Image (cartoon, rainbow, N blue to C red):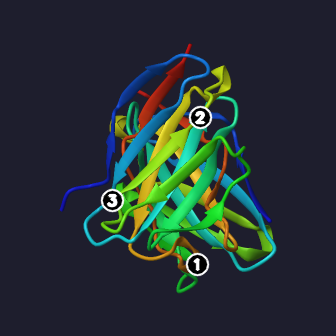
Amino acid sequence: AQSVTQLGSHVSVSEGALVLLRCNYSSSVPPYLFWYVQYPNQGLQLLLKYTSAATLVKGINGFEAEFKKSETSFHLTKPSAHMSDAAEYFCAVRGGADGLTFGKGTHLIIQP
Amino acid sequence: KAGVTQTPRYLIKTRGQQVTLSCSPISGHRSVSWYQQTPGQGLQFLFEYFSETQRNKGNFPGRFSGRQFSNSRSEMNVSTLELGDSALYLCASSLERTDNNSPLHFGNGTRLTVT
């Protein structure tokens, strides 16, 4: 079985500041890890996925995430926040034959 | 290439009724998964279909069922609706079965309200 914990249901940053969204996972097998973003009244859009080819994964819209096995973490970062980044972000893990297991989500607020 | 299409976008039903939601995957995608999203429980996996066969099922009662057609389109059915079934139902498609790391592509969902 696998699980995901996202620290902080709400994160507020100023425009231009660093964005850091935390995700810790638990998986009994080598995990597949994903970050998705959801804008209001829309479905989820894939930001990036961990494929084991590299521990630092680059995604769309300037986001990246680093896989740290020793810390069982897959935190999402962006060097400079933009107003358009305001959305709900979900970390997800797949560790077997079940569907994706999602975290509870982090609502990112961008202050002007 | 068109994305995942879900119909209808909004639905209002009464307790005890049944409902059918539809999902058309991205052309060429053979796997379709369904998720329920609620404020309290978050995103929960319902089931996955691949080549018209249900491959995986989440922890939901038998009132929740689905099927996939030969053209990969999928329908989800909920019978004997309860107030707690009010949620956003998301459909996602992928090229292959999702246990091989194929990313999911989500539709915009069907917002079901049960009164």
Picture coordinates of residue B30, whole percent (x, y): 39, 71
Circles 3 and 1 on the same chain: no
**Position above or below: A48 against B115:** below
Question: The C terminus of chain B lies in which quarter of the figure?
Answer: top right
The answer for which chain carries disc 2 is B
Residue type at mark 2? Answer: Ser
Q: Secondary structure at mark 2?
A: loop
Task: Categorize mark 3 by other alpha carbons within 10 Å: few (<14), some (14-19), many (20+).
Answer: many
| Residue drawn at 61 percent across, 42 percent down | A105
On the question of residue A42 being in view, the answer is yes
Residue type at mark 3? Answer: Pro
Disc 3 to disc 1, C-alpha distance: 31 Å
Q: Earlier in the sequence, mark 2 or mark 3?
A: 3
Disc 2 to disc 1, C-alpha distance: 45 Å
Report the front residue among B60 and B105.
B60
The answer for which chain carries disc 1 is A
Which mark, by number, is residue A55?
1
Residue for badge 3: B25
